[in-house]
Amino acid sequence: MFDSPFFARFPQHPSSFVDDDGERREYQFPSFYAGSRAMMLIYACSFEKARAALPEKRLLPVPAGFGKAAAMVAAFEFNHPQGLDPYLEVMFGIPALVRRPARLPAFGIFVKRLIVNRPENVQRGRHLWGMDKRLGELEFFDQGDFRVCEVHRYGRRALRLEVPRTGKGRQVDETRWLVTEKDGHLLLSQSALSGRKIERRGEGSLIAGPDPFAVEIESLALSRRPLFCRYFPVLEQAMSLPAESIPL
């Protein structure tokens, strides 16, 4: 499963951390994910609100029109993660340019919040990347021509994502930075993916419920419709440990 040409590009090494209960957890990095599925919605939002949501000085939102910036909500089905049980995840992020001392700026996704369905992944995200991960109940299913993700927390629906799952797709191979904040530093980690992508403009939807996670997304004054959405029916991914640490 992990012997494909994609995974062969990323030599692995062991790493570990001590979790909140004092237990040492060991993994191989980059983390490998085979047979995944993903859905993404990219919206225009208020540039000033997006800038206020980012750590100061080093990050600048990516413009998406006059007075607008881009915001992203994505959902992942990690069906075969190496060394982990399968898990589900929803991420809220802001595309941004990262100012790096004496280096060219880097483009990345600043990870604001995540919801996952397994405690182990909460621990990994917090200790290794400083990610704000919380637990929730996630469900993925097909409804007509759409792939749907619903997130429930505290007995009520927090979020519903819908993206078209049909249409002409194309093979993609991409690498991007994921940017997180931990202990007064920006951490840059490389995320690589390879798979089939179906992209549609102005389609898909995001329905927010009465939950702090959803309220924070809506507070950015999102556009009524997404700029575009993406659906990956099959995906291989590799996620590295932080490659750079930049003081704020």
Image (cartoon, rainbow, N blue to C red):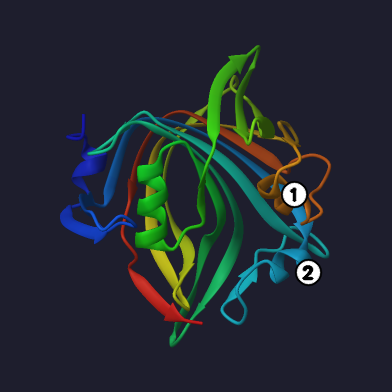
- Residue contact at pointers 1 and 2, CB within 8 angstroms: no
Q: Is residue 65 left or right of residue 12?
A: right
Q: Which residue is mark 2?
A: 48
Q: Is residue 22 left or right of residue 76?
A: left
Asked which secondary structure carries label 2, the reply is: helix
Asked which secondary structure carries label 1, the reply is: helix
Residue type, mark 2 in image: Glu
Residue type, mark 1 in image: Val
Q: Residue at position x 72%, y 47% from top? A: 43
Looking at the rendered image, the disc whose residue lies closer to the viewer, 1 or 2, is 1
Q: Could you tell me residue 7's position as x and y percent?
A: 23, 42
The Cα–Cα distance between marks 1 and 2, rounded to whole angstroms, is 17 Å
Residue 156 position by quadrant: top right
Label 2 crowd (10 A; few <14 / some 14-19 / many >=20): few
Label 1 crowd (10 A; few <14 / some 14-19 / many >=20): some
Q: Is residue 114 left or right of residue 72?
A: left
Q: Could you tell me residue 199's position as x and y percent?
A: 60, 34
Q: Is residue 31 above or below residue 232?
A: below
Q: Could you tell me residue 179's position as x and y percent?
A: 48, 64
The single residue placed furthest to the top in the displayed view is 144
| Near-viewer residue (54 or 44) | 54
Q: Earlier in the sequence, mark 1 or mark 2?
A: 2
Q: Residue at position x 81%, y 47% from top? A: 223
Q: Which mark is residue 215?
A: 1
